[in-house]
Image (tube, rainbow, N blue to C red):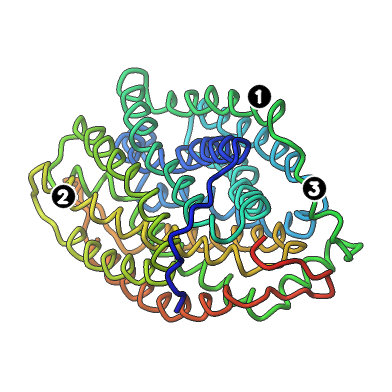
Amino acid sequence: MDKPTPKIRHPFTGYQKFVIALLAFLQFTIILDFMILSPLGALLMPALKITPGQFGTVVSAYAISAAVSGLLTAGFADKFDRKKLLLFFYVGFIIGTLLCGIAPSYEFLLGARIVTGLFGGVIGSIVFAIMTDLFPLHQRGRVMGLLQTAFAASQVLGLPAGLYLSNLWGWHMPFIMIVAVSSLAGVFIVYYLKPIDEHLKLQVDKKAYEHLLHTLNEPRYLLSFATTALLSLGGFMIMPFSSAFTVNNLGIHQDQLPTIYLITGAASILIGPLVGKASDRFGKFRTFIFGSFLGMLMVVIYTHLGITPLPMVILVNTAMFIGIFSRMIPSQALMSAIPSPANRGAFMSVGSSLQQLAGGIGSIVSGMIVVQESSGMIRHFEVVGYVMCGLSAITLVMMYFINRFAHQPPPTNGMPEVAHGT
């Protein structure tokens, strides 16, 4: 188990602070684009006259196309300046989101989500590769905590604003809003982000497929990929139907959904950095254990709720997010220590691909488990909760070994040795 880190200050430089802010904003737009479908589900399904199974397919279309894109990109991920790679995929993501904003039918929306996933699904892996390149291991818990504020900000700012716009002008408007703010982020990438190309000096694989094979043949990488997939599977199972469950099963009015997202998101903005500091201070694996047990407890409670007062729904959601963040932040920080510098882009791309693929499978499986009655009630949601708890227990064991690997020198695969944790 990782040992607590002595309380030594490692302040960020001015440029590091800018990079954190920019990457967090990029994550904000990517996460918001994906998450906005969940609260829109209660409006979108009747508007397009689609079933829960079809809605699960729309959600999974993004994830599965992102998985394919990540795998195809992995061989090239370390062959280019990460800034240029980031800009290329971010422009494609903006175009895909614009197509979602003008989608007139279920089929068009499905195609638009595929395009968005092909580009947007790779961006997270590039962001994490940049983070790992620019920040040493002893800072990454705090960096991940700050980056995860994007998740919270998407709830505090993005989801309430998106729901408000959808109530005024229809479910298309949130996507148009995302296009506007994403375009602004693209300007900052072009003019202010410095080239990130030190990894290019370490490359020995001349062909993309060789680089991908070297990444896939390393045993500790394979364990990391499997753990990443299982960590993602459970979250994607519960998220797509959370808004419909909240409205139809918990008795919360559609107009009160923005309040839930606003308050739980505001709490999450505080939770993320605190969890990041705790994982650096007390140990990343210890923090992960805490988050796993809290998350399992809150998922069981949440999926068994009936008609519930709004304050209790907010309290349960907030506690559930504490558990989620306490798993997500330390696990991603530990994963970042596994690959060698020359393999980071490929490692992150394959991991992201499997994460998205697992998420897509999770959405489909969840859509097969739950049943929406004519009254709108979601049935068998507690079964989804039990599956999530089982997956959490398995990942606890897997993360034990990931933690051990993270504190050993990374494999070189024939690459030049580089100081661990850089």
Specify few, some or many for label 3: CA neighbours under 10 Å numbering under 14, 14-19, or 20 or more: some
Which of discs 2 and 1 lies nearer the camera? The answer is: 1
Please name the amino acid that badge 3 sits on.
Answer: Asp
- The answer to whether residue 253 is visible is yes
**Which residue appears farthest toward the top when viewing the image?**
168
- The answer to whether residue 364 is visible is no
Specify few, some or many for label 2: CA neighbours under 10 Å numbering under 14, 14-19, or 20 or more: many
Please name the amino acid that badge 1 sits on.
Answer: Val
The image quadrant of residue 309 is top left
Residue topped by disc 2? 249
Q: Earlier in the sequence, mark 2 or mark 1?
A: 1
Q: Earlier in the sequence, mark 3 or mark 1?
A: 1
Left or right of 223 on screen, residue 245: left
Asked if 317 appears above or below 174 in the picture, the reply is: below
- CA gap between label 3 and label 2 equals 51 Å
Q: Give the residue displayed 48% in from the left and 59% down from the top.
A: 359
SS for tag 3? Answer: loop
Please provide percent x and percent y for residue 11.
Answer: 53, 46
Please name the amino acid that badge 2 sits on.
Answer: Asn
SS for tag 1? Answer: helix
Question: Is 310 or 400 nearer to us in this picture?
Answer: 400
Left or right of 344 on screen, residue 13: left
Residue topped by disc 1? 187
Please identify the quadrant where the N terminus is shown.
bottom left
Residue topped by disc 3? 197
Which of discs 3 and 2 lies nearer the camera? The answer is: 3
Left or right of 255 on screen, residue 240: right
